[in-house]
Image (tube, rainbow, N blue to C red):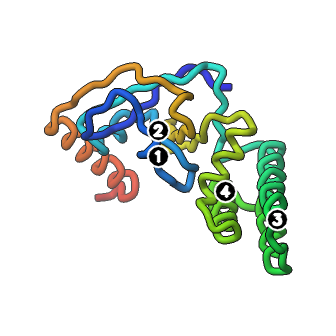
């Protein structure tokens, strides 16, 4: 469960509702992309959409899910493959077992998630990322979350009905460029402090 938090989406387009036709696939899942970092959102457009999600919502942690969460997801992943009418070759079985080994050894879980999605894409000849997101949704998650710098998050929400637009703000182009420039300078100073 999550505490209430503001999520932001930047766009140059005018809209009052998010349209499922614009769902994107990323390494963190298939859905609508948001962040808790308003400056990052402003990099994507001069309108900032603030959304709210119910307090009772569950976001799958892409950085450090519990062993239970990882194993439940992996079991559903295997169930999905087994539910299809496909031949489980030695090569496919080997790949599935390698992914299972990575569950406990790979420090960045989202890379394992992406590999699971990619394997589903090749085996089922469809969008594996969408299938993985559907699996998480059936497990009760409305999306995924990934920690980024300064205690912020990237959040991917799977379903348009899991959130509502709270407000829309237009920011000036000059303010947006200044924010982007300041962010680049901060990041540059962090990576090269002696410059």
Q: What is the spatial separation of the Cα atoms under label 3 and label 1, in whole angstroms?
A: 31 Å
Q: Earlier in the sequence, mark 1 or mark 2?
A: 1
Q: Depth-wise, is mark 1 or mark 4 nearer the camera?
A: 1
Which residue in the structure is indicated by mark 4? 113
Q: What is the spatial separation of the Cα atoms under label 4 and label 3, in whole angstroms?
A: 13 Å
Q: Earlier in the sequence, mark 3 or mark 1?
A: 1
Q: Earlier in the sequence, mark 2 or mark 4?
A: 4
State the quadrant of the C terminus. bottom left
Q: Depth-wise, is mark 1 or mark 2 nearer the camera?
A: 1
Crowding at mark 4 (Cα within 10 Å: few <14, some 14-19, many 20+): many
As drawn, 161 above or below 26: above
Which residue in the structure is indicated by mark 1? 23
Tell me where residue 142 appears, x and y as whole percent: 62, 34
Q: What is the spatial separation of the Cα atoms under label 2 and label 4, in whole angstroms?
A: 24 Å
Tell me where residue 186 appears, x and y as whole percent: 32, 47
Residue 177, by quadrant, is top left
As drawn, 53 above or below 28: above
Q: Is residue 162 left or right of residue 21?
A: right
Residue 44, by quadrant, is top left
Which residue in the structure is indicated by mark 3? 101
Residue 16, by quadrant, is top left
- Disc 3 + disc 2, Cβ < 8 Å: no
Q: Is residue 191 left or right of residue 122?
A: left
Q: Earlier in the sequence, mark 1 or mark 4?
A: 1
Q: Residue at x 35, y 20 (%)?
A: 167
Q: Depth-wise, is mark 2 or mark 4 nearer the camera?
A: 4
Q: Is residue 169 left or right of residue 151?
A: left
Q: Residue at x 69, y 61 (%)?
A: 116
Tell me where residue 68 appears, x and y as whole percent: 83, 43
């Amino acid at each position: 469960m999550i505490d209430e938090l503001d999520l932001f989406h930047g766009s140059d387009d005018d809209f009052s509702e998010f349209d499922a036709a614009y769902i994107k696939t990323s390494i963190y899942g298939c859905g609508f992309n948001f962040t808790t970092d308003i400056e990052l959102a402003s990099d994507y457009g001069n309108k900032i959409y603030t959304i709210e999600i119910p307090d009772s919502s569950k976001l799958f942690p892409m950085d450090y899910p519990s062993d239970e969460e990882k194993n439940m997801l992996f079991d559903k992943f295997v169930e999905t493959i087994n539910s299809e009418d496909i031949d489980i070759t030695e090569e496919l079985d080997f790949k599935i077992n390698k992914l299972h080994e990575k569950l406990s050894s790979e420090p960045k879980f989202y890379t394992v998630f992406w590999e699971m999605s990619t394997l589903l894409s090749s085996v089922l000849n469809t969008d594996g990322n969408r299938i993985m997101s559907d699996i998480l949704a059936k497990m009760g998650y409305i999306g995924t979350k990934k920690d980024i710098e300064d205690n912020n998050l990237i959040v991917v929400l799977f379903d348009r009905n899991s959130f509502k637009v709270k407000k829309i703000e237009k920011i000036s182009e000059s303010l947006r460029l200044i924010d982007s420039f300041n962010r680049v300078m901060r990041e540059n100073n962090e990576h090269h402090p002696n410059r």
